[in-house]
Image (cartoon, grey):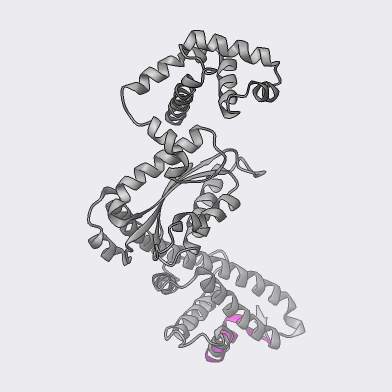
Amino acid sequence: MLINGVHAAQWLRDRRQSLVDRVLSGLAQPGSGQPDADLPWIVGYNLDLFVRFLEGPEDRPVTEDDAADLVASAARRAGEGQPVENLMRDYQVGFDAVWRAVLEEVGEADAAGLLRLTARTHAHLLAVTTLVLRGYHHEAARLSIGERDARYAVYAALVAGEDPATAAGWAGLTLTDHYLVLSLQLSGSPITDRDDRPLVTRHRRANTIQRVLAEHTDGEVLVVIGDPTATALVPVRSVAAADAARAFPGLRQLVEVLDVDLHVGAALVALADIPAAVTQCADICELAVATRRPPGVYHLEDVLVEYQLTRPGPALQLLLDRLSPLDRHPDWEETLRVYLRNRCDRRLTAAELHLHPNSVDYRLSRLAEACGFDATDPAQRALAHTAMCVRDVAAHRAGRRA
């Protein structure tokens, strides 16, 4: 490994300062502000480490003890919030600057040695970047866990109705007077050719939810995601518009960009009303999914009747019992569902089910005998609608538990 007849390690050692200056010049970016005071020392340290690597046996790996200061420097950069891509760029640019200096002086007689030096350079770069990335991510993970725990403490306090001020101070968050409370339900099969990677799909969805919501607010969005469900608290600075919740553009974008169906229960509330709103939005979202409404954003006024009809009480079980015969006759259930959706028009119902109208009448009459109410009687249609709504919600909850 000769450069103009001099061993590469000695050649690098003899030109140490000029190479450090060359690397620093390559790393300098216009408008980057005050340079890192430790950078010259780190560049020199890395160059010295490379020289020792060239002087040692080819099969001796670079260890974390060898690169301890490089690892510590990477951890410091993680603590300062510097992007990891900047770290990787610096190492690539630094080694490229040294390599170009070598190419400027290498002679034709050194071609064979240059090939060996190339292999050693790539091996060293791989080893060093692996170690510094590990150091960076260890520190980033430590900070992320602390930040995540602090943010979750704020979320937990808000949802529990406790005073969030202390937790917000620890997390460095500024609370607002009003929040858009969201309950999200992701359903359906993802539109992807890689269904064998469910964990990647889940992480991608979670990242999309956090990113899109954060892009449309100037505050800190608090999100807890447990695919296929999620709860989000979105700070709202101004509530001057009565339809502020409906106008939030992040929800419309979420519905568009996610690769699965998305139902959202939403409510804009004051800080103190968040606990009740979280429960209410979850119920709204559940109703939208259970009653087979199309994907979209739903507010209480969109499901007023269904919401009130499904509140807990002794009548719920009686209504479920009324429709228990449908367990044995799914065709009756589908007929009743389509009949109610088509505003009790037997001809529209028959057309949708590809039946003769008389077949629709027959099924509804058998259902009336078995369940004790006649959906064709205008006075009893409210009972039929209520019973079906309760049955849908019960089936949805049973499926979720399963």
Position of 286 relative to 13 (above/below): above
Position of 250 relative to 82 (above/below): above
Position of 281 relative to 235 (above/below): above
Question: In the depicted view, which residue is nearer to us: 16 or 218?
Answer: 218
The quadrant of the rendering that contains the N terminus is bottom right
Residue 171 point in image, percent of width and height: 31, 63
Q: Can residue 225 be seen from the camera position used here?
A: no
Residue 34 point in image, percent of width and height: 45, 88
How many numbered discs?
0
Residue 61 lies left or right of residue 342; in this view the side is left
Question: In the depicted view, which residue is nearer to us: 239 or 103?
Answer: 239
Residue displayed at 53% across by 74% down: 86
Magenta stretch: residue 22 in it?
no
Residue 62 lies left or right of residue 121; in this view the side is left
Question: In the depicted view, which residue is nearer to us: 319 or 203?
Answer: 319
The quadrant in which residue 27 appears is bottom right
Residue 133 lies left or right of residue 145; in this view the side is right
Q: Can residue 245 be seen from the camera position used here?
A: yes
Q: Main secondary structure of the magenta part?
A: helix
Residue numbers of the magenta segment: 4-18
Residue displayed at 50% across by 36% down: 289
Q: List the single residue furthest toward the right.
A: 108
Residue 85 point in image, percent of width and height: 54, 70
Residue displayed at 49% across by 76% down: 49
